[in-house]
Amino acid sequence: MPYWSHEEENALKTMVEQGKPIEEICKVFHRSLEAIRLKIRRLGLEPPVSRKTASDKVTTASTTTTRPIKMAKDLISPEEALKMWLGCVKRLNEPGCTPQDVKRIRLILTALKGYIIVCSDYYERIRTVELKMEQLKESMVKYYKMQYEMAQSEEGKAKWQRQIDELEVEPEAREELKAKKYHVWPRIARRRE
């Protein structure tokens, strides 16, 4: 088909703004329905309503044979993802893999790698937040202890002591929190050379 002239584009804009049906616009310009819809979209206009009835069941959306993706109920841990990744690598090394199997397994490997990286970043951020919260709590305890020492009355001292007691954790629990280990794999991928 020939290119659209400026006059044709202006006429198309006018017809769309007037609310003319798309079939009528097709007849005026002697172009297909899809060509008109495409040009209307490229001009940034809202396509007019078709005269076809609902019984014709014409859809403009693309169709697909892929089933909708269901959200997972449970997340797998990075360790489980690594085990799956290793299983895929072992499967690739086995004889008898068809080219289609190889493509599918490589796609799974790529997805697992991305999942592991996302989980690692997530765990790193959680650990950073936990450490900052622990530091904040320690500084608050120091502040409350200072206020306790400066308090003049027994009532004031009791108030600050309650605040300190609420924040302080038993020594065993504090050590357990500090010893808490996350299996974090640092992102080396972004520093590839």
Image (cartoon, helix red, strand yellow):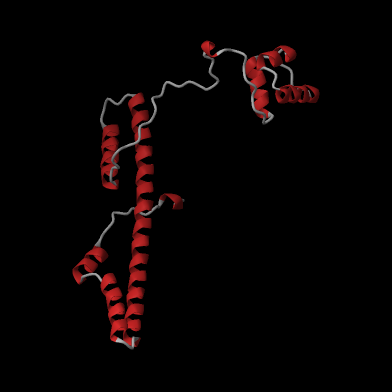
Residue 51, located in which quarter of the rendered image?
top right
> Residue 172: x percent and y percent?
19, 68
- In the image, farthest residue toward the bottom: 152
- Residue at the location (32% across, 24% down)? 98
- Residue at the location (52% across, 11% down)? 55
- Residue at the location (40% across, 52% down)? 188
Which sits in the foreground, 150 or 153? 153
2 left or right, relative to 54: right
> Residue 117: x percent and y percent?
37, 47
Which quarter of the figure is the N terminus placed in? top right
75 left or right, relative to 58: left
> Residue 168: x percent and y percent?
26, 72
43 left or right, relative to 73: right
Q: Is residue 49 above or below residue 92?
A: above
186 left or right, relative to 38: left
Residue 95, located in which quarter of the rendered image?
top left
> Residue 15: x percent and y percent?
73, 21
- In the image, farthest residue toward the right: 7
Q: Is residue 169 above or below residue 81?
A: below
